[in-house]
Image (cartoon, rainbow, N blue to C red):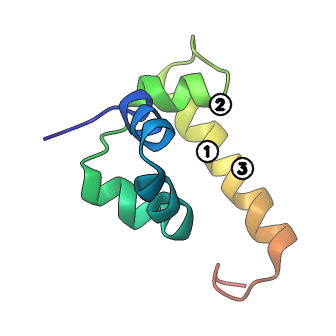
Amino acid sequence: MAISIGELLGRAQSDAAFLAQLSANPLGTAQAAGLQVTSADLKALLRIPGATDAELVEVLQQRLAHARASSGCGLCGD
């Protein structure tokens, strides 16, 4: 069963155990809960709701490149 970001956050707000689980393992918990993220969701989160999908990809690539350049974590191909 797929859930939206809003539904995931609503559950976290009303269920303390789920909030703790989400805090400890955000990605795993969101995936296990059935979170489905659409391009419209990403555009809204990035505050570019009118962007095309190609523009969304460009923004994501720029942000990832910036994160890789500034992290020096060794996990990003540095």
> Which residue sits at x=50%, y=37%?
13
Kind of element beneath mark 3: helix
Judging by the rendered image, the residue that carries numbered circle 3 is 63
Residue 10 is left or right of residue 43, and the answer is: left
Q: Nearer the viewer, residue 67 or 8?
A: 8
* Residue type indicated by callout 1: Leu
Residue 12 vs 65, above or below: the answer is above
Q: Residues within 10 Å of mark 2 (few under 14, many from 20)?
A: few
Q: Is residue 49 visible?
A: yes
Q: Nearer the viewer, residue 27 or 73?
A: 27
Foreground tag (3 vs 2): 2
Extreme residue in the right direction: 70
**Residue 19 placement (x, y as % from top left):** 49, 53
Residue 71 is left or right of residue 60, and the answer is: right
The label shown at residue 46 is 2
Residue 13 vs 30, above or below: the answer is above
> Which residue sits at x=57%, y=10%?
50
* Residue type indicated by callout 2: Leu
* Residue type indicated by callout 3: Arg
Circle 3/circle 1 CB separation < 8 Å? yes
Kind of element beneath mark 1: helix
**Residue 34 placement (x, y as % from top left):** 24, 48
Circle 2/circle 1 CB separation < 8 Å? yes
**Residue 9 placement (x, y as % from top left):** 47, 36
Judging by the rendered image, the residue that carries numbered circle 1 is 60
Residue 10 vs 66, above or below: the answer is above
- The Cα–Cα distance between marks 3 and 1, rounded to whole angstroms, is 5 Å
Number of marks in picture = 3
